[in-house]
């Protein structure tokens, strides 16, 4: 039964649309936690388009479940992560021009850069997860880095345009998941998961954590955050 990490970035997106003080993602994190979230995930992007440094610092003090900081494997973010010391850092690729994280981190091609970052985080006891595509070479590279976990990018599954394609992408996730478990890596998954497509992913053997943002915050606009989180939690734990 996977744990639910609720990504609250898009509460900050609404705030930043007016550059005001509301809605506060810190409040959202508290409500998500009360509604059963097992973790709070936030992405401090280089361009600060949604989450701000203050959000991370305050949440470090207020969030009582796991705090999962998504970040690029870059110097500035590494410095911030070392200062704040969240429970977990998920290393993601980042491009200024992308709307959201578009693909997994290419750990094979960026091995030394990722290692510089992950070694520093691991040294102070921060758990490190690498957001990667469901690909054997990436899993092996993650293992070589000595990180605890990988998060498989579920975007291709989420974007599948018909049932056949979705089944194929699900198979790819299942195979990659088994490979990660065989390497004794903790298995997380996320990106593009919704109330409609999440159940088969939640049922994949060994998946320990799902990180879900946009769909939960979208539903929260209509039904409230507490209900939205509870409904997702119910779906992934049946
Ligand atoms: N996992 C990672 C590593 C991400 O970068 C994101 C998007 O910020 C998510 C999960 C959540 O994706 P979504 O908002 O599509 O649920």
Image: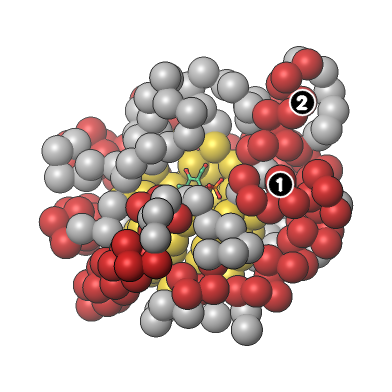
Q: Answer yes or no: is residue 220 visible.
A: yes
Q: Which mark is residue 4?
A: none
Of residues 157 and 32, the one nearer the viewer is 157
Q: Which residue is mark 2?
A: 15
Of residues 13 and 186, the one nearer the viewer is 13
Element under disc 1: helix
Count of labels in the image:
2
Q: Cβ(mark 1) to ligand 1 < 8 Å?
A: yes
Q: Is residue 13 left or right of residue 90?
A: right
- Which percent across, then down, holds residue 144? 17, 57
- Which percent across, then down, holds residue 92? 38, 40
Reply above or below: 68 against 58.
Answer: below
- Which percent across, then down, holds residue 220? 79, 50
- Looking at the image, is mark 1 or mark 2 earlier in the sequence? 2
Name which residue lies at 71% across and 46% down. Answer: 218
For discs 1 and 2, the disc positioned in front in the rendered view: 1
């Amino acid at each position: 039964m996977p744990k639910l990490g609720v990504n609250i970035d898009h509460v900050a997106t609404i705030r930043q649309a007016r550059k005001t003080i509301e809605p506060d993602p810190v409040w959202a994190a508290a409500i998500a936690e009360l509604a059963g979230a097992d973790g709070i995930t936030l992405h401090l992007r280089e361009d600060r388009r949604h989450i701000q440094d203050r959000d991370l610092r305050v949440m470090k003090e207020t969030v009582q479940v796991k705090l999962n900081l998504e970040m690029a494997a870059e110097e500035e973010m590494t410095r911030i992560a070392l200062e704040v010391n969240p429970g977990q850092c998920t290393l993601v690729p980042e491009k200024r021009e992308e709307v959201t994280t578009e693909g997994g981190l290419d750990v094979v091609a960026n091995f030394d850069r990722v290692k510089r970052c992950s070694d520093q985080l691991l040294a102070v006891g921060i758990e490190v997860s690498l957001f990667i595509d469901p690909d054997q070479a990436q899993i092996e590279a993650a293992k070589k880095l000595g990180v605890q976990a990988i998060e498989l990018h579920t975007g291709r599954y989420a974007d599948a345009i018909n049932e056949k394609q979705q089944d194929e992408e699900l198979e790819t996730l299942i195979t990659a998941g088994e490979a990660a478990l065989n390497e004794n890596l903790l298995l997380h998954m996320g990106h593009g998961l919704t109330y409609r497509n999440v159940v088969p992913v939640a049922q994949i053997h060994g998946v320990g954590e799902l990180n879900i943002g946009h769909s939960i915050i979208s539903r929260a606009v209509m039904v409230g955050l507490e209900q939205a989180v509870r409904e997702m939690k119910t779906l992934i734990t049946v």
